[in-house]
Image: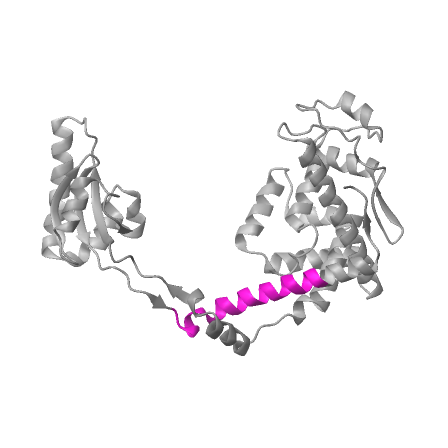
Amino acid sequence: MKKASFVILTLTAAASISFAADTAAPQKVAADSKVIKATMPLAKPVSFDSLPEVIAEVDGKKLTKAEVIQKIMAMTGGKMPQEMTQQLLENVVKRMATEFVQSTALLEAAIKAGFKPSPELAVKGFNDYLKTATPFQVEQLKKGLAQRSTTLEAFIETKKTDKVFQEQMAINAFMEKNIISKCQVDEKEAKAYYDANPKAFETPADGKDSMKASHILIMVKENADAKTKDAAKAKAEKLLALLKKDAKLFNELAEKESQCPSAKNKGSLGAFKKGQMVPEFEQAVVNLKTSEISGIVETKFGYHIIRRDTLKKAEKKTFAEVKDKLQLVLKQQKIQKTLGTFIKKTTDEAKGKIYIK
């Protein structure tokens, strides 16, 4: 788990919600669900009637039905999705209630620890996120912003004065210092896990009754005319001639010339059992010795050049091979477990209550 990714709403999620709110058509929020049912174009009979007037409360702060309706209206642009059902709506509200209780309790804990929401903390939190986010995450955020004709710089300028955003960044900073930074996994701990879970690092062997092969396919339709078939076969024969001179070219030619999706794997089809391939292809593999390359094999898919490959034996990766990734995974697990325990403890101590059943 990367830094700043544990908050109740991630930066990208928060951005999406704020975008939805900013781009939604102005709506008059009504606490009376009957008014909403009459004005919102619902595809299915979804009602807010079953919701209590107070959805949740913690430390004297309340999440009301009116606030929940307002948030849902903002996020959906005033229109319920067609797939929305009563059960799904109530599940969404329950999640909102849980997030409200947790974030409120965590914010109180953060403020008591000296992490007071501020524009400066918001900017620092956003910049910290950008430093630790993957390139893909940053690119997705940029694309989302570009669609709204804005930039990262403009986004943070608008968000740094946003009260909710400031609070999220205060929680982030608090949790980073008090939880995440303390969750470390050393090499000794990783080695202990490696030794205690040997099968987790094994690559299983191919089945004894399996075959394994790679191929180069020059594709041609069964109903193609003679000229097209002859051209495809001639190309296959040209490739075969190259392989007869140097069999080591197989992977390279498969990657460049094969018209099968397996080209991205240098022609490898992996292991397969009898009956899984078309008869002509299977019989050709059966007749080959390991590492031997066939002549031209015609099937309904076109012309193949096939190499029978060695079945894979069971292997176990060494600790050195998995150490870095294992330490990262174990650290993420430790962070998640520690955060879960801390959030529950903090929420329980704040005596948070959720009233929706």
Report the span colored magenta.
Answer: 317-341
Specify whether 299 is left or right of 165: left
- From the viewer's perspective, is residue 201 above or below residue 347? below
Considering depth in this image, is 207 or 122 the residue closer to the camera? 207
Q: Percent position (x, y) of residue 180?
A: 66, 66
- The residue sitting at 14% across, 38% down in the picture is 298
Specify whether 347 is left or right of 11: right
Q: Quadrant of residue 319?
A: bottom left
Image quarter hosting the N terminus:
bottom right
- From the viewer's perspective, is residue 19 above or below residue 111? above
Residue at the right extreme of this rendering: 60
The overriding secondary structure of the stretch rendered in magenta is: helix
Q: Residue 330: within the magenta?
A: yes
Q: Residue 212: within the magenta?
A: no
Q: Percent position (x, y) of residue 9?
A: 69, 50
Q: Percent position (x, y) of residue 89?
A: 70, 35
Considering depth in this image, is 173 or 309 the residue closer to the camera? 309
Image quarter hosting the C terminus:
top right
Q: Is residue 117 visible?
A: no
Considering depth in this image, is 326 or 145 the residue closer to the camera? 326
